[in-house]
């Protein structure tokens, strides 16, 4: 496992367990599946995009980004637990007390030792945020993001929204890669930012704090990143969840809905 991959796991621990200190392998080896699920469900309740109801689209996007960070952290850690619990060398590493530089921080109490990784992340308890059910209530009378519109129209579940957003995010280049291609960052700079993001800062903000990029450069990189990623709706066509004609019709209905409830300009 590379140093960057290790730091991504440590960052995922900070996201789900609210850690404000360095994480080490002892903590990763201590985590069990039941504790991971418990922390994940709590974070879903705290970051779900529905909590931004009534706010503008910018705030909705920011909450969705935080929500996606939680989803990705769960995917990273559940995959690690699957590999860890199936690999004898991992058990030997734990038994030999590998990496005791930092005393492990205990996550929330857990009842069992867990097992193999589930096919999908666990859904939260039954209720308005159940990832696996189609919404059957009224359409909110406010502007929505396209994925949210599809959910509230009863077309897709929250699980599908998460899958589509993860797919979209994987299509775009990372800011560090773009900065390197423009000659603004060196590989050493990128590793330093990735391996020392203690305050959950976005890559761009960390680069600005370190004096490696200016605010204008970060805005340029974000623009290039956004332009290079594929459209959210393409996920549904590529995975045969909608035809191109069906997607176009949904987009037309979505724009009509947002125009109906758009706030008048000041």
Image: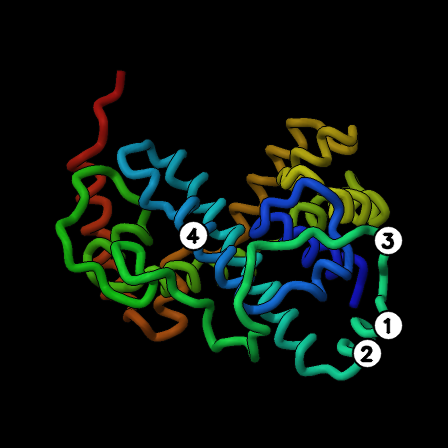
Give how far across and how far down residue 263 sits, in percent.
23, 27
Q: Distance between the residues labelled 2 and 1?
A: 6 Å
- Describe the element under mark 1 as helix, strand or loop: loop
**Residue 44: image tag:** 4
Can you identify the residue that label 3 sits on?
101
Instruction: Kindly check if marks 4 and 1 are in contact, taking CB atoms under 8 A apart as contact.
Output: no
| Quarter of the view holding residue 79 | bottom right
Seen at 71% across and 27% down, the residue is: 214
Whole-angstrom CA distance, mark 4 to mark 2, is 34 Å
Q: Nearer the viewer, mark 3 or mark 4?
A: 3
The residue that label 1 is drawn on is 96
Task: Please tell me which of labels 3 and 4 falls first in the chain.
Answer: 4
Quick one: quadrant of the N terminus? bottom right
Q: Residue at x 34, y 60 (%)?
A: 158
Q: Which of marks 3 and 1 is nearer the N terminus?
A: 1
Furthest toward the left, the residue is 138
Secondary structure of the residue carrying tag 2 is helix
Of callouts 3 and 2, the N-terminal one: 2
């Amino acid at each position: 496992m590379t140093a960057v991959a290790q730091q991504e796991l440590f960052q995922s621990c900070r996201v789900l367990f609210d850690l404000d200190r360095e994480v080490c392998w002892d903590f990763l080896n201590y985590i069990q599946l039941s504790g991971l699920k418990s922390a994940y469900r709590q974070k879903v309740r705290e970051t779900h995009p529905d909590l931004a109801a009534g706010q503008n689209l910018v705030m909705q996007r920011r909450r969705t980004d935080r929500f996606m960070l939680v989803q990705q952290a769960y995917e990273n850690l559940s995959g690690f637990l699957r590999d860890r619990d199936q690999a004898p060398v991992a058990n030997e590493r734990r038994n030999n007390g590998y990496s005791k530089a930092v005393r492990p921080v205990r996550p929330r109490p857990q009842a069992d030792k867990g097992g193999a990784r589930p096919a999908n992340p666990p859904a939260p308890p039954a209720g308005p945020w159940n990832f696996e059910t189609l919404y059957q209530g009224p359409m909110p009378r406010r502007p929505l993001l396209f994925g949210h519109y599809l959910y509230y129209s009863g077309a897709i579940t929250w699980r599908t929204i998460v899958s589509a957003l993860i797919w979209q995010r994987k299509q775009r280049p990372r800011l560090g890669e773009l900065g390197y291609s423009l000659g603004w960052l060196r590989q050493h700079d990128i590793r330093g930012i990735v391996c020392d993001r203690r305050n959950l800062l976005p890559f761009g903000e960390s680069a600005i704090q370190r004096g490696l990029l200016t605010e204008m450069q970060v805005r340029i990189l974000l623009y290039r990143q956004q332009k290079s990623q594929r459209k959210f709706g393409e996920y549904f066509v590529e995975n045969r969840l909608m035809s191109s004609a069906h997607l176009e019709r949904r987009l037309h209905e979505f724009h009509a809905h947002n125009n109906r409830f758009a706030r008048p300009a000041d």
